[in-house]
Structure formats: structure tokens, C-alpha cells
Image (cartoon, rainbow, N blue to C red):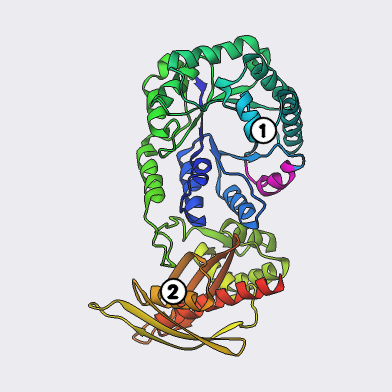
């Protein structure tokens, strides 16, 4: 049987929908799709910020089996920045998308057909110099002039595209019409025989799944789907049709069908989970591999740096060496170190800076019949400021009071609490990870008062952010 690639565009579609997904939530969806063994995971492109670059780098480190695809603009030189973020992926793919219909070419790209041909050929060639896997996406292909579309696809293939995708953006074609459209491309463009042809269908007539499957019968070998409803073919239903009638298509996907329903359900919950805009606790995403060993005593400084990157940290050489030395001392007494332990080591050794903010006092009121309230007083460059906030719990209230003083909300990427001693007066250790401008900052606090250790950890991370922002 021939292989049908399933290319999931959930992340790319959600990026343009105003989704409230956090950095950690997006990374979790990417991991779930990879676990499901979709052939391709497509991400939204870079907008020039460090946060975008870190998002792609984090996904590149997390994805193990799927192709990771990121779009590149038509402007000259656009491939270099994307490739720099994507190059460490196991299976990187660069994408070039361009409108194929006359209306969209002039309205969206302000280009005439000849100029568009040159721009596509140039962008694809630039991507091909970086990556061995390059996809050209002809947007609004079904409403384009047939002769121009064929010339555009031919130019992209000649420039180095290994996959070509045609889109029915209007979604007005019926399955038999779309099947004939695909068959016509194969008849008229001999070069398509040597590459993969993909399709993306709008669900405007609620027929995206049927049109995608019809395209497979006509020779298409890659289908763009979404795990949640984003107006295109749905992952679960399209995969179900292909699996049920595999003998008809003489083709199969690489999806782990047993996990399909469960994983799609998890992604749907992540996308639909309500976000409390006033709470620092963004969502309930949990990493199932927190205790997975990431380091052993035989690992050197380079392995420590790679392990830190895998969990989201971008350490400089000085911090990497400090973390390595601290980790090595711990590993003298045990066989391996997990992600949570590495997190704690990074929090206590990396980017140690002078305190911009210090805690002068805090009062926390909480009970089963009252809302938790925090009153915190901070000192910032000799000036005292107070914040009072209500929260879902004492720690939530404390963090909100700090945000009230600093006038800034940082995404809370992770929050860990554990006991480090035993007995009634046990010491509690808290690790807080904050995201600022796409970079992770961790803080650590230790106290017999778990609220106090949480405030210490938050302030430790906050001071690191403030120090770097002042330096910049």
C-alpha cells in the first residue's frame, strides 16, 4: 500500500483565530500530534520576535517522529531566520505559500502574474539551499487561471520544491469536481510524477473531508487536516474514512489509530479550556514526562546545554557551566536527574542577579468561607509599593498582588512545590517558571511557609527578568 501523509495545520490555523493558548499549551499540542504520529506538523511563521524563534526551537527539540514545517515569506532573505530556528528539528521542512488566483495576487501580494512567478521561484530556491524538504502551497488554486497555475507549479518544482499543495480556499467544489481538478494537474504537469502532491480544502460546504478523500483517489498523497474545527478537513474523520476504505485507495496513513480519539479529545480540551484572564495560572497543561531522566553522570557540558534547551531554557555559556557543575555534584550521589530536578538546579544557579525587587512584608488571609486575599509590600530601588488582591487561593492572590505592583503580567509556565525535609516543620521548595518575550526564567524559594517559598520563587524569577530588561 502507498503511504498517505497527514499534515496537521491545527497550530497554524489557531494562530490566526485569536486563540488564548499559552506557550506551554502550544508546545503540548505539538507533542500530542507527534505522539499520534501525524506525518507533518505545521507551525505558524515567525514575526521577527524572539518569542516566535523560541517557540519553533522548542518544538524542534520536542518533535521526534513527525516532519516539522514552518512557512517562509516571499521576501528575499526570509528563509535564513526561519531555518536558524528550525534547523535542529529531526525532519525540518520549509514552506512557501503564494496566492494563485488573480484577485488574491493583486489584493494580498500586490503582484502581477509574471512577478509572482519570479518571487515564488526565488523563494523556493532560497529554501532549497537551506533544507532538503521544501513545500510550495498554491493558495486559492481552484479559482486561478489554469495556465498560470500550471506555470506556477512548474516553476516551484524546477526551483526545488519536493511537495506541492493546492488549496480550494473557497470550498465550492464538489468531490467529483475536485477529483477531476487534481487529475487534470497530473495530466498537464509531468513533473508532478516525481514529487508529492498535497491538498487543502475549505469546509464551506461541509465537504472538506469528502473532497480530500476524492483527491487521494485522483493521486494526491498528502492531506492537510486539523485536529479541531478550524474550517478545513478534520483529522479524525478524514483518517477514519481512509482507514475504513483503505482497500479502495490502496493507501494507508501512519497514524496511531488506537490513540486517535483520545489525543484529539485532549487537543480539543486544551483549545477550549477557559482562560481566567485575572489569574497568573494560565492552564492545566501537565507534562507527563516530568520525571523522565534527562542527565546522567557521564554527560558533559554540551549534554546539559541540550537538556536545558529541550525543556525551554536558552542558557549562555557561563550559566551552562554553572548548571553543569551543580548537576554533576548531585549526580555523584544518584544515577540520573529528571526534568524537575534540572529545573530546580537551573533556578538556583543560572542568571543569579542583584535584587531589583525585595519583599518588605506580606499578609495572607484565607479560609473556607472567604476569598483568599494577599497584601504585599515590595521595595523597588528604595521606593515601597503595596498591592492588594483577591485570588482563587493564597498563592494565586499573592502573585496577583505582585503583578499589581509591577504593572506587568508574565505567563506562568510552571509551578512546582515539593518537601525537602520531613516532619511538622518541613522545608518546602517552590520552583516558578515565568515567560517573558519568549524566554524562560526560573526562580526558586525555600521556606517552612509554602506561601512564603512561592513568593520567594516568583520574586527570584521576576528579578532575573527585570535585570535582563534593564541590561537590554
| Residue marked by disc 2 | 400
Kindly report the secondary structure that dominates the magenta region of the rendered protein: helix
User: Would residue 136 be seen by someone viewing this image from the given angle?
Assistant: no
Instruction: Note whether 392 is above or below 195 in the view shown.
Output: below
Residue with the most extreme top position: 187
Which of the two labelled residues, at mark 2 and mark 1, occupies the earlier sequence position?
Answer: 1
Q: For the residue labelled by badge 1, is the local secondary structure a helix, a strand or a loop? A: loop
- Residue 323 is inside the magenta segment: no
SS for callout 2: helix
- Magenta region: 78-91
- List x then y, in percent, for residue 444: 52, 76
Closest to the observer, 410 or 130: 410
Q: Is residue 212 left or right of residue 328?
A: left
Is 378 situated above or below 243? below
Judge whether residue 400 can be spotted in this image: yes
Q: How busy is the neighbourhood of tag 2: few (under 14 within 10 Å), some, or many (20 plus)?
A: many
Q: Position of residue 275 (x, y in %)?
A: 40, 58
x, y percent for residue 397: 39, 76
Amino acid at each position: 500500500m502507498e503511504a498517505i501523509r497527514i499534515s496537521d495545520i491545527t497550530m497554524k490555523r489557531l494562530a490566526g483565530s485569536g486563540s488564548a493558548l499559552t506557550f506551554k499549551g502550544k508546545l503540548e499540542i505539538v507533542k500530542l500530534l507527534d505522539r499520534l504520529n501525524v506525518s507533518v506538523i505545521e507551525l505558524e511563521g515567525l514575526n521577527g520576535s524572539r518569542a516566535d524563534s523560541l517557540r519553533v526551537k522548542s518544538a524542534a527539540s520536542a518533535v521526534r517522529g513527525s516532519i516539522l514545517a514552518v512557512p517562509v515569506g516571499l521576501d528575499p532573505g526570509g528563509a535564513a531566520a526561519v531555518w536558524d530556528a528550525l534547523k535542529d528539528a529531526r525532519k525540518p521542512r520549509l514552506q512557501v505559500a503564494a496566492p494563485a488566483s488573480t484577485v488574491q495576487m493583486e489584493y494580498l501580494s500586490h503582484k502581477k502574474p509574471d512577478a509572482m512567478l519570479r518571487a515564488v521561484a526565488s523563494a523556493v530556491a532560497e529554501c532549497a539551499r537551506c533544507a532538503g524538504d521544501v513545500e510550495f502551497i498554491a493558495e486559492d488554486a481552484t479559482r486561478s487561471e489554469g495556465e498560470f497555475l500550471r506555470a506556477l507549479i512548474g516553476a516551484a518544482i524546477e526551483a526545488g520544491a519536493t511537495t506541492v499543495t493546492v488549496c480550494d480556499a473557497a470550498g465550492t467544489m464538489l468531490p467529483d469536481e475536485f477529483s477531476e481538478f487534481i487529475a487534470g494537474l497530473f495530466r498537464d504537469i509531468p513533473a508532478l510524477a516525481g514529487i508529492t502532491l498535497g491538498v487543502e480544502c475549505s469546509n464551506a460546504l461541509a465537504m472538506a473531508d469528502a473532497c480530500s478523500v476524492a483527491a487521494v483517489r485522483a493521486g494526491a498523497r498528502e492531506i492537510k487536516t486539523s485536529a479541531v474545527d478550524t474550517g478545513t478537513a478534520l483529522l479524525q474523520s478524514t483518517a477514519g474514512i481512509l482507514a475504513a476504505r483503505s482497500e479502495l485507495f490502496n493507501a494507508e496513513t501512519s497514524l496511531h489509530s488506537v490513540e486517535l480519539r483520545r489525543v484529539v479529545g485532549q487537543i480539543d480540551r486544551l483549545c477550549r479550556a477557559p482562560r481566567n484572564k485575572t489569574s497568573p495560572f494560565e492552564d492545566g497543561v501537565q507534562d507527563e514526562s516530568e520525571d523522565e531522566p534527562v542527565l546522567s553522570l557521564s554527560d558533559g557540558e554540551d549534554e546539559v546545554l541540550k537538556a536545558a534547551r529541550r525543556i525551554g531554557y536558552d542558557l549562555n555559556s557561563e550559566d551552562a557551566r554553572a548548571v553543569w557543575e551543580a548537576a554533576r555534584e548531585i549526580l555523584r550521589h544518584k544515577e540520573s536527574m529528571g526534568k524537575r530536578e534540572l529545573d530546580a538546579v537551573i533556578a538556583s544557579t543560572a542568571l543569579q542577579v542583584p535584587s531589583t525587587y525585595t519583599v518588605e512584608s506580606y499578609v495572607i488571609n484565607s479560609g473556607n468561607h472567604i476569598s483568599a486575599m494577599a497584601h504585599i509590600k515590595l521595595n523597588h530601588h528604595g521606593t515601597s509599593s503595596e498591592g492588594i488582591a483577591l485570588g482563587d487561593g493564597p498563592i494565586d492572590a499573592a502573585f496577583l498582588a505582585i503583578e499589581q505592583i509591577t504593572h506587568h503580567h508574565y505567563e506562568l509556565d510552571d509551578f512546582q512545590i515539593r518537601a525537602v525535609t520531613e516532619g511538622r516543620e518541613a522545608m518546602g521548595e517552590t520552583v516558578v517558571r515565568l515567560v517573558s518575550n519568549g524566554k524562560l526564567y526560573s526562580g526558586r524559594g525555600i521556606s517552612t511557609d509554602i506561601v512564603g517559598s512561592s513568593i520567594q520563587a516568583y520574586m527570584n524569577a521576576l528579578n532575573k527578568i527585570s535585570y535582563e530588561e534593564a541590561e537590554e
